[in-house]
Amino acid sequence: SQQGEEDPQALSIQEGENATMNCSYKTSINNLQWYRQNSGRGLVHLILIRSNEREKHSGRLRVTLDTSKKSSSLLITASRAADTASYFCATDRGSTLGRLYFGRGTQLTVWP
Amino acid sequence: DGGITQSPKYLFRKEGQNVTLSCEQNLNHDAMYWYRQDPGQGLRLIYYSQIVNDFQKGDIAEGYSVSREKKESFPLTVTSAQKNPTAFYLCASSTPRDRLNTEAFFGQGTRLTVV
């Protein structure tokens, strides 16, 4: 079963604009992760935010986590056409086994 | 180069056949995972293994089997009992240095089609 729900399901923007994707989840977590998937390829890890963290940055990526609302957001600033991909959030549901539970993803299209 | 390799990239299966998808990693990771991805969907866990010679069923294990005889290898067999096997299969590995915060490394996937 899906752990999280990303929204929007699809997002289309122009180069240079910011892209914001959201993720909601239902259980307690140790951490929340964001992954990127180019069409027909494997997933690539972007960023991990721990349950005791509220915000994390990595280059043009900014992730926030609100455990009281059980939600997270991924912000990509100054988007580029190369950012076109699907973005997934994943949580561990509080497990220590290393299992990850993925949402259905947001398909981001950045137009040049 | 360290990484996780899946083969083949494309695989065609006839009705009633078993097929085996390969997954090899040279990252010295203890844990390995198999996920299935259907169009427009997230990833669903088929099987996972935390250590050699041990594995557990995930959420959709019916019609699949795995083995973990070596740390580097975690092959997935899609049996004839799997009624709808056409999908994109992803293998991943991780190492729980810190069991609470571990990222997964993914292979490039195998696209299986039943013909």
Image (cartoon, coloured by chain):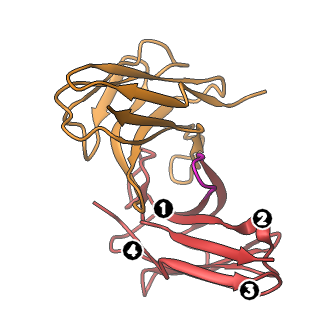
Q: Chain of mark 1?
A: A
Q: Nearer the viewer, mark 1 or mark 3?
A: 3
Which residue in the rendered view is the most extreme toward the top? B69
Q: Chain of mark 3?
A: A
Reading the image, the residue beneath label 4 is A25
- Front residue of A96/B49: it is B49
Q: Nearer the viewer, mark 3 or mark 2?
A: 2
Give, as a single range, the part of the protein colored magenta. Answer: A37-42
Q: Are marks 1 and 3 in contact (CB under 8 Å)?
A: no
Residue A55 vertical placement versus B109 (above, below): below
Chain rendered red:
A
Figure colour of chain B: orange
Reading the image, the residue beneath label 1 is A90
Q: Earlier in the sequence, mark 4 or mark 3?
A: 3
The amino acid marked with disc number 1 is: Ala
- Coordinates of residue B6 in the picture (x, y in percent): 56, 28
- Front residue of A4/A30: it is A4
Reading the image, the residue beneath label 3 is A18
Q: Helix, strand, or loop for circle 4?
A: loop
